[in-house]
Structures are given as C-alpha cells and as structure tokens.
Amino acid sequence: MGKTVAIVNQKGGVGKTTTCVNLAAALTALGARVLVCDFDPQGNATSGFGLDKTRSPNVYDVILGSADIGSAICQTRWADVVPANKALSGATVELIALDRREYRLKDALEKVRARYDYIFIDCPPSLELLTLDSLCAADTLLVPVQCEYYALEGLSDLLYTVRLAKRSLNPPLDLEGVILTMYDGRTNLSMQVAEEVKRHFPGKVFATVIPRNVRLSEAPSHGLPVTAYDPLSRGAEAYSGLAKEFMERNPIMAAR
C-alpha cells in the first residue's frame, strides 16, 4: 500500500513543484513505483514531466466524478502522473455542493494506492479547499522552505490549517519533514535561516539541502526532471541524495 505525501506550502516560489517533480523522478530511478498527482491549477508539475496541460481527462474530471482516476493517469519515464490545468481553479466552487467534498481526492487515490510505493500531491500555493482535500488525502506532509528572509512567514498559518485538518478530518496526518531549498552556503543568511528552521522543527528537517542551481530552473522549460536534463548538476545530485534519504525513512515494502 503506497504512502501518500502532500508537498505543501502556501507561499509561492519556494520550490514546491520543483521538489515534487525531481524527488519523484529520483525515487523512480531508485526503483520505486511513484505517482504524482498535480493538484495545482497552474499545472506546473504536469508540464514539468513533459505532458500536455490540455490533456483530458485530468484531475479536475476525477474529483468532480466525470472520469475514473485510472483513465487520467499518464505514464512517463520518470513517474506516473495525474495531470492538471487551469480548469481546476473552478473546482473549489463546484466542490462546495458535493458530498464528501474534503475527501474527493482521497477517495480517488485510494483506488490506485496499491499500485504505488509513493504518491506525491503537488498542492496549490494557497490555503483553500483544494489544499484541504490534499491534507485529507495525505498520510504525511513535506514542506519545502526557501532559505530566505521571509522563509518562516506564513508557516504558522499553514500549521494552523494542518492542525484543523488533523483534528476534525484526518487525525493520522503527520509532518514527514521540512526540506531546505534554494540554499546558498556562501551567505550567512542561508545558514541562519537553516538554523532557525531546525529550531522550529527539531528532528524534522532533512539533512539534504537543495542548492540554488540554474539547471533546476532550466529543466522545466524542457519538460524534464533535472536528473534527466543534467544528471551531473548540483541540483540533480541534491535531489538524488534527498530521494535516498526519503527512502531510508520510508523503505519500500518487500512484497509487491
């Protein structure tokens, strides 16, 4: 039974989608069976795997009940993907009138969960119904935190939303860990932010840090994970290291 992990931070530009795409690809390279569910209306994880955002059916059709999740899954060399596009932005309004609106994503993913070792949900950069659906579907959360001055700003709001979801909708929900992104070891600021994050989340910060790396920025425009675009880059090496660390914490079940 696969583990479902929501990659979440309501602050944009922190490396959330970059982490989702590249961690998934690196885990696949290690032999894991991985599904990425793009749950962000921007659809950046979809294009990050080289998929057409206009493809239908997609996750919007799945959560509104007009398509089965199996028909929406696209296979790529780096992970299976449930794509998304801007149509998803209207789902918040449409979900309000539906039964089990907070569990639509969970109910869909449960149907394919046994096929995968890890399922990653790329959440939208906001705290609204789509994010709540993601929190209800997840076993744990991964929180990318940018190594910049405003890194911790807004995290209290995120953690408050997580506590609400945990209390009333998904009691087993737990924090998988925090990933430090856009790290620049040449600056005191990056080191100070890293220490502050470790102080706020003792024992929950991954040892592997993701550096600032131009290849990480270039790879999505080619529809490739960085491990395929430039496997020798610092960004690719970092996500390969993160994947190994993640797998050590969450070993693949021997029986498949």
Image (cartoon, rainbow, N blue to C red):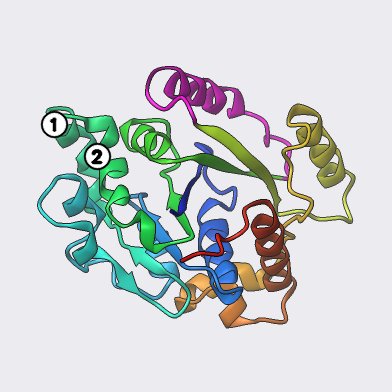
Examine the rendering and report whether any part of residue 39 can be seen. yes
Residue 132 locus on image (x, y percent):
37, 32
Give the mark nearest the N terminus, 1 or 2. 1
Residue 163 locus on image (x, y percent):
51, 21
Secondary element at tag 2: helix
Q: Residue at 45% across / 17% down in the picture?
A: 167
How would you rate the neighbour count of disc 1 (Cα within 10 Å): few for under 14, some for 14-19, many for 20 or more?
Answer: few
Residue 103 locus on image (x, y percent):
28, 35
Q: Say whether marks 1 and 2 touch (CB < 8 Å).
A: yes
Tell me how far mark 1 sits from mark 2, CA to CA.
9 Å
Q: Residue at 48% across / 40% down in the picture?
A: 139
Q: Is residue 221 above or below residue 200?
A: below
Span colored in magenta: 147-172
State the image quarter where residue 52 is shown.
bottom left
Callout 2 amino acid = Arg
Q: Residue at 21% across / 41% down in the picture?
A: 91
State the image quarter where residue 170 is shown.
top left
Secondary element at tag 1: loop
Callout 1 amino acid = Leu
Q: Residue furthest front?
A: 255
Observer-nearest residue: 45 or 105?
A: 105
How would you rate the neighbour count of disc 2 (Cα within 10 Å): few for under 14, some for 14-19, many for 20 or more?
Answer: many
Residue 57 lies left or right of residue 53; in this view the side is left
Observer-nearest residue: 2 or 124?
A: 2
Residue 183 lies left or right of residue 109; in this view the side is right
Disc 1 target residue = 98
Residue 195 locus on image (x, y percent):
84, 37
Q: Which mark is residue 104?
A: 2
